[in-house]
Amino acid sequence: MSEERSLNFIEEIVEDDISAGKNGGRVHTRFPPEPNGYLHIGHAKSICLNFGLAQKYGGKTNLRFDDTNPVTEDTEYVESIKEDVRWLGFEWANELYASDYFDLLYAFALNLVRQGLAYVDDSTPEEIAAQKGTPTEPGTPNQYRSRRIEENVQLFEDMKAGKYPDGAKVLRAKVDLASPNMHLRDPIMYRIKHAKHHRTGDKWCIYPMYDFAHGQSDAIEEITHSICTLEFIPHRPLYEWFIEQLELFPSRQYEFARLNLNYTVMSKRKLLQLVNEGYVEDWNDPRMPTISGLRRRGYTPASIREFCERIGVAKRENMIDVALLEFCIREDLNKTAWRRMAVLDPVKLVITNYPEGQTETLHGENNPEVEGGEGGRDIPFSREIWIEREDFMEVPPKKFFRLGVGLSVRLKNAYIVTGQSVVKDAEGNITEIHCTYIPESKSGSDTSGVNVKGTIHWVSIPHAKTAEIRLYDRLFRVEDPSNEDGDFKEYINPDSLKVITGFIEEDLATAVPGKGYQFIRKGYFTLDQYSTPDKLVFNRTVTLKDGWVKK
């Protein structure tokens, strides 16, 4: 956004810290995704915030993978995350992994055991949950809480050595079973999980919990501003407790409202369901709110950064209208997308007084929004062309400013034509329209003196390329599918994808994925990443106007 905006509350904190000389005026943030799925638009907000702060204040951002759960994590997700961050326009100072610190985290845990601040517990998950009490009743200690330090040290070392099966024991911090904050009631620090890790293989069979690994990783990296979403507010006292007991660098956690977007779901678990149960093609299906899905659909990094800028950074959860995201991509593509003609519901138009076999080359601008039109392209014109079926009416009503019998219209970048007659099939459907053209009415050198109110697009039949056109719409038909009764998948929009065959300018045969095109009067489109020269496939990024307003 070009206009000056006020600082958000996190920027105010950072500027106060710099003014006070805190951490030597240094700003070091981190983006810490768990590699258990593809990033979505909500992560884009966090990426823009963390990397944006570092850029603004001359600092650094680490990309740290929170890979402490080997069962759900995969290198495929690691690579997709790196691709998404780079595509959004950011570069990290250091690529790190929580697994880089497994030895150090184990040493930290052993340190707490030796201080009498952690103990090995043989209870079942159900017993631990019951012993923690309720928000209004304190927890009750069990017999394992009073184990001797030496016994806890030995048992924890035996856990690491693989002497116990999954779930047999856990390591818990000894904090405060009477705390009003449930997260401080002796939280679990380590669990036993005999599973191959995507980076450390079979070296470990115990893995740290998020609450133990995260703050210590921040401290090891000397992160100055650890920015999380609001659900981590109750975790902050535990974050600080671990750092304080271990006497580590005092990283500080700050929380902001995460992005909630209507007409979609943002839960990785639900997105994974959509993929696994075949409701969508994959994580990068253009209907998904994933960054890879948005990229494949034709969204640009600039439009997503602008969207994140516009929604801002707040302390209160709210639902953002997807129409704002669509507005941002329309604004960006209006300035950058090349204009091309595509006919999506074709009917043949024959210009009866145009010489048979003749072809001429007309000129069209690439983008009239840019001075000079960003260059242009040649458009072949011939006697037979495709036009949209909706652009012709045999018996046109008043104020129909397109083509009809006896009605004249301009063909974009070409001539004025006047409808004469139609050819119909046995069912009465129009298969061919006959018209005449005015040779003196050529665009750019019109001397005909004829004025018409309408302009329609077209494609020359001998030169047209055939393409599969995928018309994408919102994946869900209700604003908040997660909050509706029943299974969220019941609310999938049955019209979220329509596949049709259309005819496009031959110039579009050289289109590349990621380049935006405005199909004149039809919307913004991009070449699908899996398109081939033998089968061209274009995805609709967004319509020209918000068609959901009246819905």
Image (cartoon, helix red, strand yellow):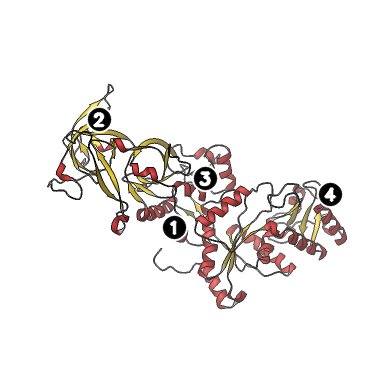
Question: Are discs 4 and 3 less than 8 Å apart at CB?
Answer: no
Circle 3 residue: 284
Q: Secondary structure at mark 4?
A: loop
**Which amino acid, by three-letter code, is at mark 2?**
Glu
Label 4 or label 2, whichever lies nearer to me, is 2
Question: Are discs 1 and 2 less than 8 Å apart at CB?
Answer: no
Task: Answer left or right for 204 relative to 416.
Answer: right
* Residue at the top extreme of this rendering: 426
Compare marks 1 and 2 and give the one earlier in the sequence. Answer: 1
Quadrant where the image shows the C terminus? top left
Front residue of this view, candidates 498 and 76: 76
Compare marks 4 and 2 and give the one earlier in the sequence. Answer: 4
**Which amino acid, by three-letter code, is at mark 3?**
Asn
Report crowding for label 3: few under 14, some 14 to 19, many 20 or more residues within 10 A (C-alpha): some
Name above or below for residue 257 compared with residue 296: below
Calculate the distance from the C-alpha at mark 1 to the C-alpha at mark 2.
Answer: 44 Å
Residue 163, numbered label: 4
Report crowding for label 4: few under 14, some 14 to 19, many 20 or more residues within 10 A (C-alpha): few
Question: Are discs 3 and 1 less than 8 Å apart at CB?
Answer: no
Compare marks 4 and 1 and give the one earlier in the sequence. Answer: 4
Circle 2 residue: 432
Task: Answer left or right for 324 relative to 252.
Answer: left
Report crowding for label 1: few under 14, some 14 to 19, many 20 or more residues within 10 A (C-alpha): some
